[in-house]
Amino acid sequence: MKRLTHPLTVASLLAFNGGMVDTAGYLGLHGLFVAHVTGNFVTLGAAIVTGGHGVIGKILALPEFVLVIALARLAGIVLRGANLPARIILFGVQVLLLFAFFILAVRFGPFTDSDTPLALLTGFAGIAAMACQSAMQRVHLANMPPSTMMTGSTVQATLDVVDILTGAHPEQQTNTRARFRRLAATISAFAIGCAMSALLYSYVGFWCLALAVVVGFLAAVIQVDEGRA
């Protein structure tokens, strides 16, 4: 009998990777967010005003992110229709994309100009990996907090803390506490991923992404109790 893991464990691993990969991309690709792509609107505006690098990559980040999510969704439909393990296969694809990001970044980085073809290819590999991760978590771990967008999670966690401390809505306290535990775990994992990435990047550069590949592999192979997801 296979031992099934609580989905929060996998969600926390994915959140760790969200912070790690996004931070490494930001540091090594002139402010490109590969996971939290809406942040690229801010850095795009700054790059235009200051004349910095990375304008092309930031413009293309959002449409690529959307395209990969759509493709992942379509692939999941096809795989499930063929009675194939969609979650395992698509998370495997995400790990391969993470590995491609790691190899390209180590081989060709650091980049003095993130708008060169090789820098763009590297960034696109990272964006594709994080888009695939976001799509798969939304489908297979839908009750878990998102692994790459912490603004909404932080807002909800703050509201939950206030409700818990004040005893508001007593009939919902059990659900509120459970939700807060999930949010706190993923927010903490994301923050740890950011800190680890920044620290490791300062010493080994893009080699820090090797850890992200390992963590992504663990998240892909762990057997999840989807009944609790």
Image (cartoon, grey):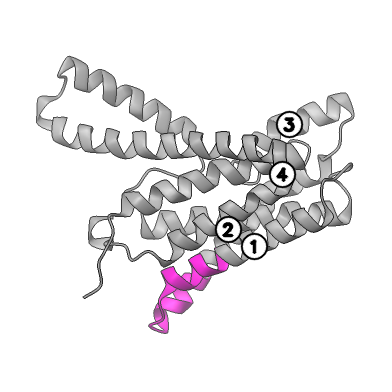
Q: Circle 2 sits on which residue?
A: 213
Q: Nearest to the eye among marks 3 and 2: give it.
A: 2
Q: Amino acid at mark 3?
A: Thr
Residue 1, quarter of picture: bottom left
Q: Amino acid at mark 1?
A: Phe
Comes first in the chain, label 3 or label 2: 3
Badge 3 marks a residue whose secondary structure is helix
Comes first in the chain, label 1 or label 3: 3
The magenta segment: 75-94
List the single residue furthest toward the front: 203
List the single residue furthest toward the top: 166
Residue 160 in the image, given as x and y percentages of width and height: 28, 26
Question: Is 161 located above or below residue 35 in the figure?
Answer: above
Q: On the rendered image, what quadrant is the C terminus found in?
A: bottom left
Q: Circle 4 sits on which residue?
A: 204
Report the disc number at residue 99.
1
Q: Decide: few, some or many residues near mark 1? Use Cα within 10 Å; few <14, some 14-19, many ≥20.
A: many
Marks 2/4: CA–CA distance: 15 Å
Do the residues under discs 3 and 2 have CB atoms within 8 angstroms? Answer: no
Badge 2 marks a residue whose secondary structure is helix
Q: Circle 3 sits on which residue?
A: 43
Comes first in the chain, label 4 or label 1: 1
Q: Decide: few, some or many residues near mark 4? Use Cα within 10 Å; few <14, some 14-19, many ≥20.
A: few
Report the disc number at residue 110.
none
Residue 75 in the image, given as x and y percentages of width and height: 52, 72
Identify the residue at horizontal 36%, vertical 38% (top origin): 185
